[in-house]
C-alpha cells in the first residue's frame, strides 16, 4: 500500500520512540525522512536573569510556556535548516507539534501532500496545541474528552507490528517499567506486595536519576533504576512477561501504549484506567481494573487463562492499520473513542 511512498516523520524523543516508528514505517514500504527531535536536555539559560524570569513565570504566574519558548527559539534555525534540505513528500506525520515552532510546522505542511498530527497527551495539559490544529490536514487525539474541540479526530495508541517476537513468555511473570510519578508509587507498592504473597515473579522498575527519589522508591519495596531503555529494549521485557502493569496518568483518560501491547502481544494487563471497559477489545479475563483487590482476587486473575481476541480486533489496533487510518489511505478500519 505504501511501497515507495515518502513520509516526513517528526516527533520528540520521548522514551526513545522514534526508532520504533521508523522501523515500522519502513516495514510498510515507506521511504522515511526524519527531522531529528529536539533535545531539551541540551538547553542552557543564557544568564541568571533568564533563569530567574522562568522561575517567576512558572511558580508565581503559573506560566509553564516560557522555558518551552526559549527551547524552541534556541532550536528554530537548526530545525528550519534541516527541513529545507528535504524535498517534497507524499505524507507527513508529526507527534506533539506544539513542541516545535509554528513556522517550522507551517513549512513541513507545505512540503507534504497530506500532513497529519497526533497529540498523545491531553489538549488541556498543553493549551499551546490549539494554534497548531488548523495547520494540519487531519489532527488526532486519544482522549474522548478532547473530541469537543473543533477540528480534531479520534484515535487510540497502538502496538508496533514490525516485530512480533517469538520470545517464549514466562508464565506468572508481571512486568512494569515507568518514570517516577508520586501518585503511582503507593499503587505499585501495593500490587508488588500482593504479587509476592501470591508467589508471582515480578519485575517492577521505576525510572529516576535523582538520588532522593530513588531512595524513596526503594523504601516502598520497589526497584529504582536510572537506566532509560530504548522502547525496543523495553519490548524485549514485555515479550518475556505474560502480565503487564499499566498505571494511568490522571491528567487524561486516554489509554497508554501498555494496553495495546497487551492486545498485540497476547498479554494480560493490570490497569488503573477503568475506561478500558468501554472499548471493543475489553475482556475481563485479560484486564484487571485495579481497585486495591485482595491477594486472593489478584491470584484468581493471574490464574485465569488469557482469552484470545478476534484477528480483526488485533489488526485494528496495530500500527499498520493506525497509520493507514490517520493518513486516510484505504483500506483501513476506523478507530473510534468511546463516548
Image (tube, grey):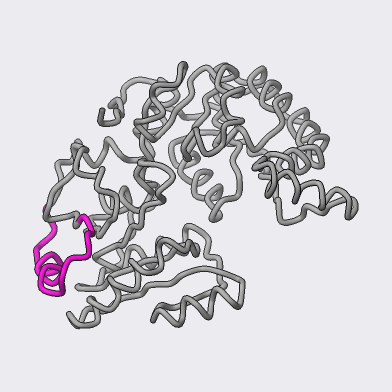
Residue in front for this viewpoint, 290 or 285? 290
Tell me where residue 152 appears, x and y as whole percent: 44, 21
Position of 252 with respect to 207 (left or right) is left
In the displayed structure, would residue 199 be above or below residue 167? Answer: below
- Is residue 295 inside the magenta stretch? yes
Query: In the figure, residue 48 lies in which quadrant?
Result: bottom right
Tell me where residue 31 appears, x and y as whole percent: 56, 34
- Is residue 197 inside the magenta stretch? no
Query: In the figure, residue 136 lies in which quadrant?
Result: top right
In the displayed structure, would residue 19 be above or below residue 300? Answer: above
Tell me where residue 252 appears, x and y as whole percent: 40, 42
Residue in front for this viewpoint, 257 or 208? 208
Which residue is located at x 30 percent, y 29 percent?
335
Q: Which residues are magenta?
A: 289-307
Question: Which residue is outermost to the front?
Answer: 60
Tell me where residue 177 appears, x and y as whole percent: 42, 65
Which residue is located at x 40 percent, y 23 percent?
153
Residue in front for this viewpoint, 25 or 133? 133
* Image quadrant where one finds the N terminus: top left
In the displayed structure, would residue 67 be above or below residue 333? Answer: below
Position of 62 with respect to 123 (left or right) is right
Which residue is located at x 22 percent, y 59 percent?
291
* Image quadrant where one finds the C terminus: top left
Which residue is located at x 24 percent, y 65 percent?
242
Amino acid at each position: 500500500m505504501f511501497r515507495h511512498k515518502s513520509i516526513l516523520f517528526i516527533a520528540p524523543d520521548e522514551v526513545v520512540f522514534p526508532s520504533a516508528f521508523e522501523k515500522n514505517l519502513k516495514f510498510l514500504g515507506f521511504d522515511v525522512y526524519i527531522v531529528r527531535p529536539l533535545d531539551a536536555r541540551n538547553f542552557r539559560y543564557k544568564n541568571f536573569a533568564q533563569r530567574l524570569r522562568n522561575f517567576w513565570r512558572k511558580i508565581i504566574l503559573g506560566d509553564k510556556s516560557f522555558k518551552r519558548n526559549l527551547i524552541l527559539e534556541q532550536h528554530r534555525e537548526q530545525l528550519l535548516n534541516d527541513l529545507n534540505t528535504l524535498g517534497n513528500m507524499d505524507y507527513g506525520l508529526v507527534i506533539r507539534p506544539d513542541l516545535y515552532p509554528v513556522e517550522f510546522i507551517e513549512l513541513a505542511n507545505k512540503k507534504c501532500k497530506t500532513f497529519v498530527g497526533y497529540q498523545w497527551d491531553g489538549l488541556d495539559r498543553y493549551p499551546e496545541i490549539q494554534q497548531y490544529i488548523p495547520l494540519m490536514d487531519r489532527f488526532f487525539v486519544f482522549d474522548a474528552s478532547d473530541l469537543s474541540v473543533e477540528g480534531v479526530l479520534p484515535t487510540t495508541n497502538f502496538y508496533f507490528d514490525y516485530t512480533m517476537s517469538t520470545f517464549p513468555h514466562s508464565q506468572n511473570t508481571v512486568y512494569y517499567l515507568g518514570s517516577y510519578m508520586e501518585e503511582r508509587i503507593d499503587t505499585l507498592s501495593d500490587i508488588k506486595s500482593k504479587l509476592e504473597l501470591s508467589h508471582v515473579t515480578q519485575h517492577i522498575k521505576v525510572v529516576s536519576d535523582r538520588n532522593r527519589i530513588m531512595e524513596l522508591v526503594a523504601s516502598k519495596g520497589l526497584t529504582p533504576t536510572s537506566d532509560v531503555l530504548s522502547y525496543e529494549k523495553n519490548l524485549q521485557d514485555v515479550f518475556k512477561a505474560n502480565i503487564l502493569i499499566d498505571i494511568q496518568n490522571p491528567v487524561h483518560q486516554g489509554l497508554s501504549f501498555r494496553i495495546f501491547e497487551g492486545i498485540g502481544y497476547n498479554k494480560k494487563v493490570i490497569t488503573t484506567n477503568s475506561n478500558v471497559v468501554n472499548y471493543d477489545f475489553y475482556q475481563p479475563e485479560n484486564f484487571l481494573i485495579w481497585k486495591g483487590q485482595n491477594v486472593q482476587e489478584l491470584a484468581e486473575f493471574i490464574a485465569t487463562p488469557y482469552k484470545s481476541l478476534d484477528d480483526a480486533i488485533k489488526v485494528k489496533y496495530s500500527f499498520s492499520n493506525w497509520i493507514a487510518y490517520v493518513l486516510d489511505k484505504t483500506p483501513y478500519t476506523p478507530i473510534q473513542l468511546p463516548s
